[in-house]
Image (cartoon, grey):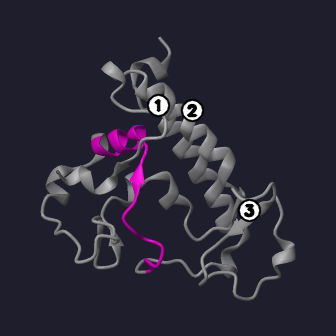
Amino acid sequence: MNSMLKHPFSPYYKLRNDIDSMCKTLENIHDRHLNCKIGCDLCCMAISVFPVEFYAIEAELNQDSVRHLQAPKDDSQCRFLVSHRCTIYDSRPVICRTHGLPLLYMSLENDEYELSLCELNFTKFDFEDFDEENTFPMDQFNSRLYLINKKFIAGFENGRYNEQERIPLAELLK
C-alpha cells in the first residue's frame, strides 16, 4: 500500500523534509552571514496556516507541554514563543522553517522576483551576489504546500475549508 494513503500527512512531511534539507544547504552556504541563533525571535509572530499544517502540528503536539502557555500580552506575538524559544520548534510551520534565509519570490505588484531576508543577516554581503543557487525559492515550495493542502481539505465533509482558508496557529491551544 502506498505510504501516502496510510498517513494523511505524508505529503506534508515530505515537503517539510525537502524544505529542511534546502534550508540546511543554504545555511551552510551563508553561515558567516547568518546571525540567527537561539534567543533571536525578531521574525516570530502570530501567524495562520493552512489546515494541513494546522492538523499535522496538532497531531505532533504534546498538549501537556504547551497547555500551560499563557496568552501573550500582544496579539501579534506567537503563543508558542516562551522566553525567546519556540516551544514547537520540531513541528513549526513551513514559514518558520525558512526565517533568516534569503527568500526569493515573485512580486504581487509586478512580474519580477523580489528578495526577502532578515535585517540582522547579510549586513556585509553584496546583494548582486544573490542568485537562484543561493536563495530559497519560496514560490516553488508555497505552490507545493498549496496543492498538498488542496488534496488534504478535499477529505473534509461539506467543504469545511476552502483552498485559501487559514487557521490561526494559536487555536492549537483551544
47 left or right of 24 in image:
left
**Mark toward the viewer: 2 or 3:** 2
User: What amino acid is found at the position of numbered circle 3 in the picture?
Assistant: Thr
Q: How many marks?
A: 3
Region rendered in magenta? 40-58
Identify the residue shown where x is 74% and y is 62%.
135
Instruction: Name the residue carrying label 1.
Output: 10
Task: State if disc 3 and disc 2 touch (CB < 8 Å).
Answer: no
Mark 2 or mark 3: name the one nearer the start of the chain. Answer: 3
In x, y percent, where is residue 1?
47, 11
Instruction: Name the residue carrying label 3.
Output: 135
Element under label 2?
Answer: helix
Q: CA distance from mark 2 to mark 3?
A: 22 Å
Q: CA distance from mark 1 to mark 3?
A: 26 Å
Determine if the magenta segment contains residue 46.
yes
144 left or right of 154 in image:
right
Mark 1: give few (<14), some (14-19) or many (20+) Cα within 10 Å.
Answer: some
Mark 1 or mark 3: name the one nearer the start of the chain. Answer: 1
The disc placed on residue 147 is: 2
Q: Is residue 29 above or below residue 167?
A: below
Element under label 3?
Answer: loop
User: What amino acid is found at the position of numbered circle 2 in the picture?
Assistant: Leu
Q: Nearer the viewer, residue 31 or 88?
A: 88
